[in-house]
């Protein structure tokens, strides 16, 4: 299993900056990718920025040029630097880890299985 703990959320004024952190623990070797998602009030969860398997990054169009995702070591932590914050960036920000492990089965032997893990979320509020 992987445990994720986010921090860094706060209330800021429009145009301000925040840096979110996500500390990972547990079976870090099983992590293929990590990233940030957010849920605005009354809206569905959406991707903000992620590392994908292989190390490249993916950003939502609405945050390109303002947000930067980075990481420490081999998935020890993932960060989200948010600049030029807008009221529409308000929401709960969640860290997600995508993992793959080999599990032994009686019938098929060792097979790969994928699991996703989520943190508890950190609130970001941007006031106008």
Image (tube, grey):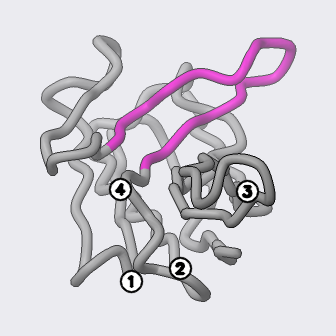
Magenta stretch contains residue 52: no
Mark 3 touching mark 4, by CB under 8 A? Answer: no
Query: Left or right: where does residue 76 sit relative to residue 115?
Result: left
Q: Which residue is pictured at 38% across the width and 52% down the height?
A: 33
- Taking 64 as reference, is 25 above or below it? below
CA separation in Å, label 2 and label 3: 13 Å
User: Which disc is residue 24 wearing?
Assistant: 2
Q: Can residue 124 be seen at all in this image of the molecule?
A: no
Q: What secondary structure characterizes most of the magenta part?
A: strand
Q: Which residue is pictured at 46% across the width and 80% down the height?
A: 28
- Helix or strand or loop: what does disc 4 sit on? strand
Q: Please rate how many residues cluster around mark 3, counting C-alpha atoms within 10 Å: few if below 14, some from 14 to 19, many from 20.
A: many
* Eye-nearest disc, 3 or 1: 1
- Taking 121 as reference, is 77 above or below it? below
- Taking 113 as reference, is 27 above or below it? below
Query: Left or right: where does residue 73 sit relative to residue 92?
Result: left
Q: Which residue position holds label 3?
A: 121
Q: Which residues are magenta?
A: 35-50
* Eye-nearest disc, 4 or 1: 1
Q: Which residue position holds label 4?
A: 80
């Amino acid at each position: 299993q992987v445990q994720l703990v986010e921090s860094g959320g706060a209330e800021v004024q429009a145009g301000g900056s925040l840096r979110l952190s996500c500390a990972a623990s547990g079976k870090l070797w099983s992590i293929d990718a990590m990233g940030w998602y957010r849920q605005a009030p009354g809206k569905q969860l959406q991707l903000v920025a992620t590392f994908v398997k292989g190390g490249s990054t993916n950003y939502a169009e609405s945050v390109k040029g303002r947000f930067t995702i980075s990481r420490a070591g081999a998935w020890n932590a993932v960060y989200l630097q948010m600049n030029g914050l807008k009221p529409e960036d308000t929401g709960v920000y969640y860290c997600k880890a995508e993992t793959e492990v080999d599990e032994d089965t009686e019938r098929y032997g060792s097979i790969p299985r994928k699991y996703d893990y989520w943190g508890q979320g950190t609130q970001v509020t941007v006031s106008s």
